Amino acid sequence: MSINLDQYNNENIKRPTGIIDILQAEEQKREAFLDQMVSVIENTLSKLEAKSGEAKDY
């Protein structure tokens, strides 16, 4: 028994089909990236404040 991988992938992977779906997927990627950047900045500020002895709440 052989499996046609192209057919399997096409049937089982949900791909955005319309422009709205594509735009929503891109927006979600941007939001996730920005959330990560905010987290990195907050962590960096916390580390710098710990070194300087000044703690602030963000």
Image: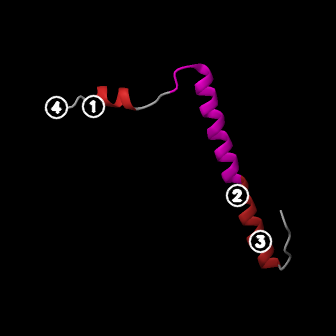
Q: CA distance from mark 2 to mark 4?
A: 47 Å
Q: Which residue is mark 4?
A: 2
User: Residue 26 sits in which quadrant?
Assistant: top right
Q: CA distance from mark 2 to mark 3?
A: 14 Å
Type of amino acid under label 1: Leu
Main SS of residues in magenta: helix
User: In the image, is 3 to the left or to the right of 7?
Assistant: left
User: In the image, is 20 to the left or to the right of 58?
Assistant: left
Question: Residue 46: x and y, percent?
Answer: 76, 69
Question: Residue 10: x and y, percent?
Answer: 36, 26
Q: Nearer the viewer, mark 2 or mark 4?
A: 4
Q: CA distance from mark 3 to mark 4?
A: 58 Å
Whichever of callouts 1 and 3 sits on the residue coming sooner in the sequence is 1
Specify the farthest residue to the left. 1
Q: Which residue is mark 3?
A: 48
Type of amino acid under label 3: Leu
Q: Secondary structure at mark 4?
A: loop
Q: Secondary structure at mark 1?
A: helix
Question: Residue 15: x and y, percent?
Answer: 48, 28
Q: Which residues are magenta?
A: 16-37
Q: Secondary structure at mark 2?
A: helix
User: Which disc number belongs to residue 5?
Assistant: 1
Along the viewing direction, whichever of 26 and 45 lies nearer the viewer: 26
Assess disc 4: are there few (<14), some (14-19) or many (≥20) residues with their C-alpha within 10 Å of its C-alpha.
few
Q: CA distance from mark 2 to mark 1?
A: 39 Å
Q: Which residue is mark 2?
A: 39
